[in-house]
Image (tube, helix red, strand yellow):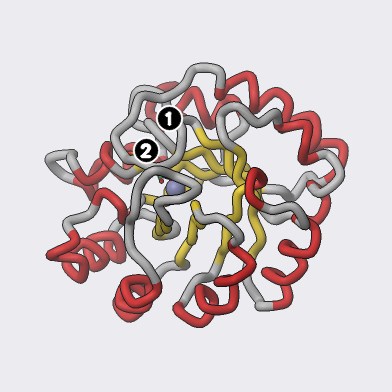
Amino acid sequence: MSHLVAPSILAADFANLQRDVEMLNKSEADWLHVDIMDGMFVPNLSFGLPVVKAIKKHALKPLDVHLMIVDPDRYLKDFRDAGADRITVHYEVCPNLHRTIQVIKELGCKACVAINPHTPVLVLEDIIADLDMVLIMSVNPGFGGQKFIQNTYKKFNDLNKLRSQYNPQLLAEVDGGVDIGNAAKLYAAGANVLVAGNAVFSAPDPTQYITELKHAVTVSQA
Ligand code: DX5
Ligand code: ZN
């Protein structure tokens, strides 16, 4: 399975969003990761539907929308209508997760579940066959630029077991504190998709940095 990179718009220059989206269009980025925060599930606000629509207007790549909001069922259709191709909800805020996943799929989007650093992967055992992707948070959600939590690698061991048993097509995405220093190790651990915000947008050449992230395994073995 090839390796995908999903730069996080959260670290873009919000006053120059069109410019940054066009940079991503021309780069080797596979998806645009779009972080939605509600100030309830996470202690921060990011942006909402009008901004997602504005990004969609210029984006040539799928929008990977990461909902860090309570009761996400309220907004699934709205985010699909705004341009989400993939929708991620958090395990911690979905008491009827199976239903939520079915709704996302009925809307025509790829369905993904995120787990916080304290949430064991094994809680996903009875839903994993229904998912397109699992997102392992490698920081506590809410802010860009945080330090990668090392226990994340252990979580991939657990996810790999569930994946081979129940859903070999499942994608595994990792989000938070990802950079060129841990990219190859994350791919080796089982990640298929790297989300990176700060590392990409603070790089001297973000386009080149995305290329390096995408091919990190090859580069590190060369
Ligand atoms: C954190 C968000 C991340 C964030 C990652 O709550 O879910 O997607 O943008 O940012 P970095 O890569 O800077 O840790
Ligand atoms: Zn995210």
Amino acid at dot 1: Ala
- Residue 21, compared with residue 198, is above or below; it is below
Label 2, label 1: how far apart the Cα atoms are: 6 Å
Q: Where is residue 43 in the image (x, y as percent from the top left)?
A: 39, 43
In the rendered image of this protein, does residue 114 appear above or below residue 189?
A: below
158 lies above or below 76 = above
Q: Quadrant of the N terminus?
A: top right
* Position of residue 88 measured from the top left corner of the image (x, y, whole percent): 58, 56
* Outermost residue to the front: 40
Q: Can see residue 168? A: yes
Q: In this view, does 80 lie to the left or right of 44?
A: right
The C terminus, quarter of image? top left
Q: Mark 1 points at which residue?
A: 183
Which element type, helix, strand or loop, lies under badge 2? helix
The picture places residue 207, in percent across and down from the top left corner, at: 23, 50
Marks 2/1 in contact by CB < 8 Å: the verdict is yes
Give the quadrant of residue 34.
bottom left
Determine which residue is flagged by label 2: 213
The quadrant of the picture showing ligand 1 is: top left
In this orientation, which residue lies closer to the viewer: 16 or 141? Answer: 141
Front position in the image: 119 or 9: 119
Q: Which amino acid does label 2 sit on?
A: Leu
Q: Choose between 169 and 202: the one closer to the eye.
A: 202
Q: In percent of the image, x 71 and y 32: which residue is there?
A: 121
> Circle 1: is it few (<14), some (14-19), or many (20+) Cα within 10 Å?
many
Mark 2 Cα-neighbour bin, 10 Å: few <14, some 14–19, many ≥20: many
Q: Can residue 33 be seen in this view?
A: no
Q: What element carries label 1?
A: helix
Rendered residue at 30%/77% (across/down): 54
The response on whether ligand 1 sits within 8 Å of label 2 is no
